[in-house]
Image: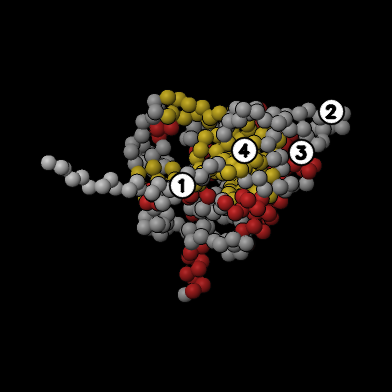
Amino acid sequence: MTVLRPPPSPAKDTPRRLPPLTLANPDMVAKHTPCTLHLSVLPPELACRLFYTMLDESQEWKRNQWWLFERLVESPHRTSFYVRRFSASDGDSEDVAGDAWQEAAQYWYNGRSTQPPRHFPDVLEEACTIVERVVNEEMKKRRRYPLEWGGDSLGIWRANVAAANCYEGAKESVGAHADQLTYLGPYPTIASISLGTTRTFRLRETIPSDQRDVRQARTFNIPLPHNSLTIMHASTQERFKHSIPPQSTIDLYRPSYPRSMASPIEPSNCRINITFRFYRPDFHPSTIPRCKCGIPTVLRADQKNKQDGSDKYWWHCNAAAQNEGKDCGFWKVLDIKAEGRGPCVQDALEDSAG
Ligand SMILES: O=C(O)CCC(=O)C(=O)O
Ligand SMILES: [Fe+2]
């Protein structure tokens, strides 16, 4: 007897695999990613002075340490955290350098106890003012997202903290991640300046689970030269992971100015990165949910699962990072309204409509 078999079902269409793409100039970065790249952003003398100052400071920076699957691991680069001093004329209800914010600095280091954070050195303050100007000009050209911070009636972005990283040699790196949103809140704008040797900044989109059958992620490699500013605009932390991958070789950086009149120019194999950030008053440390371990939780965007296409964020226990990998399993969805946070851009829009 002949057994009739149904014809083989046609192979399911798998989305096209896309090769990595190098984004070699600002136009390409803006076209393919939610980021913008700004070359030669600081006056050259200031960029060089900032490089020397932060390189000297970096002698004190530490490798982050945390527990991962029952193993204590160490970040393959050194890092530090700075807070900005504000004058009363800035109208801040609380200086971010105040005691409460020291908790936030501690959580830059995965919950490790730390010394009080340092203040911006003068040269960092000088650079920050220029960076803010560039960020605000760029933000004016962009759409705003409903969950962005809407508390500044003039819609002006400013930085109140900075995280700094030093990558020494070609092998130091940072793995693929999206930044934690604990004190930044949803849809932050993060401005990241690069000094010293050129390194590749890698961006890769996370495709939400319900779109995996229709499209694939692409890897974008962006070479970041000395004195360039990368702005990770709103939605980068919701949709992309970023990294600085290890490289087989790097070009030494040759500063254009000596440290002093008498000193020779010394080539360097270091890249200094400074990310300027705005810690939101509505994500003040006193408002961060505590888990059953009694310590502050951390907030992350859920890049894979969207609620009916809209974003979802989780507060979750982060004790494992410092507690030999053990946590209490606390997970709670962020509910901006119920938690009394804001105003967000959407609230400002509702007010003007109503
Ligand atoms: O070095 C860089 O450009 C990225 C640093 C970074 O991702 C971070 O500090 O969160
Ligand atoms: Fe990051």
Q: CA distance from mark 2 to mark 3?
A: 14 Å
**CB atoms of marks 4 and 2 within 8 Å:** no
Find residue 54 and name its label.
none
Residue topped by disc 2 = 263
x then y, percent, for residue 107: 50, 38
Viewer-side label of 4, 1? 1
Residue farthest front in this picture: 1
Distance from disc 4 to disc 1, alpha carbons, whole Å, reads: 25 Å
Residue tagged by mark 4? 200
Label 1 sits on what residue type? Arg
Can you identify the residue that label 3 sits on?
A: 48
Judged from the image, the secondary structure of the residue bearing numbered disc 1 is loop
Residue position for label 1 = 16
- At horizontal 12% and vertical 41% (from top left) the residue drawn is 1
Identify the mark nearer the N-term, 3 or 1. Answer: 1
Crowding near the residue tagged with mark 1, few <14, some 14–19, many ≥20 C-alpha atoms within 10 Å: few
Pointer 3 local density, CA inside 10 Å: few below 14, some 14–19, many at least 20: many
Give the quarter of the image for residue 275. top right
Mark 1–mark 2 Cα distance, whole angstroms, equals: 55 Å
Q: Compared with residue 19, is residue 57 higher up or lower down, i.e. above or below?
A: above
- Judge the density around disc 2: few (<14), some (14-19), many (≥20) Cα neighbours within 10 Å: few
Mark 4 or mark 3: whose residue is earlier in sequence: 3
First in sequence, mark 1 or 2: give its number: 1
